[in-house]
Image: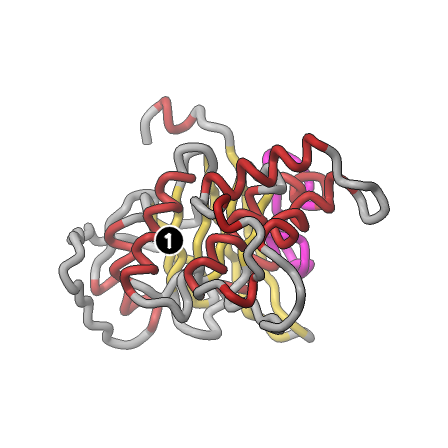
Amino acid sequence: MSEDADSRREMIAVEQVWAGYHGQIVLEEVSLSVKEGDFVGLIGPNGGGKTTLLRVILGLLTPYRGTVRLLGKTVREGRRHVGYVPQGVKFDHDFPINVWQVVQMGRLSKAGLFRRYRSEDDEVVAEALRNVEMLDLRDRPLGELSGGQRQRVYIARALATEAQVLLLDEPATSVDPQVSASIYELLQELNHEMAILMVTHNMAVVSAYVKSVGCLNRRLYYHGGETLTPGMIEEAYQCPVEMIAHGVPHRVFADHEEQKR
């Protein structure tokens, strides 16, 4: 790694984390470092611990062992700098809430539950919507949006927290390939301003958009580069995996060894 890369600020530092539920281990000795400018794609089988790792980073699950630091701070102190887009947000399509109001929710941590929104909050919300190209639809009811448009609104809500790090859990679930590509292109643009850690099952996304790759199946096989091999995937998934790219530029990745960081 170059001296310049070493000098970048560490946004997420996961050290030797063991975690799970009701005494059952899901994550085993996981270490991960995400620095300024990183765009990390996290892949792995269902049940391999990807969402669990995000929950640990967000402070929603306390690890049995190990530590997590966010921007050099404890999770409690640092998570206000982290924006989160969960997987498959469910909502009542008839619920009377519009795009602007959804994104405003991202200001609650700044405004507090009982404080009125201020002009500075409105400016942040407008900028977040502008960044995801949804400002023109600010008054549209959420239930009238397409799946891809709703995902952009949820990303805008995360941006409204003034996040320096963005965590996403399958951000393009249940949208068609063209819409999915537009979301990942948006994330590439946002990556100029913030670090991104994204869970995905989409191999084409990993090969076309992210800068580094992590394969998680209880243990983390982390790669500081953007390369991926069938052997690497099979080691993480513990079964043969066929790599297919449908018209998407992709890379052939170097062999790897299990890494702690």
Could you tell me the amino acid type at mark 1? Ile
Residue 77's place in the image compared with 66, above or below, is above
Which of the 4 quarters of the picture holds residue 94?
bottom right
Observer-nearest of 33 and 147: 147
Quadrant position of the C terminus in the picture: top left
Observer-nearest of 242 and 258: 242
Report the coloring of the rendering.
secondary structure
Please tell me whether mark 1 sits on a helix, a strand or a loop.
Answer: helix
Q: Position of residue 174 (x, y in %)?
A: 40, 71
Q: Position of residue 121 (x, y in %)?
A: 68, 36
Q: How many marks?
A: 1
Q: Which residue is found at the position 26% from the left and 53% from the top? A: 256
Residue 73 among those drawn in magenta: yes
Observer-nearest of 225 and 108: 108
Q: Which residue is found at the position 19% from the left and 50% from the top? A: 254
- According to the picture, the residue beneath numbered tag 1 turns out to be 183
Farthest residue, direction right: 114
Which of the 4 quarters of the picture holds residue 70?
top right
Q: Position of residue 213 (x, y in %)?
A: 34, 51
Observer-nearest of 141 and 158: 141
Q: Which residue is found at the position 44% from the left and 54% from the top? A: 198
Quadrant position of the N terminus in the picture: top left
Q: Which residue is found at the position 58% from the left and 49% from the top? A: 157
Residue 241 among those drawn in magenta: no
Q: Which residues are magenta?
A: 56-75
75 on left or right of 157: right
For disc 1, the neighbor class at 10 Å (few under 14, some 14 to 19, many from 20) is many
Q: Position of residue 139 (x, y in %)?
A: 58, 52
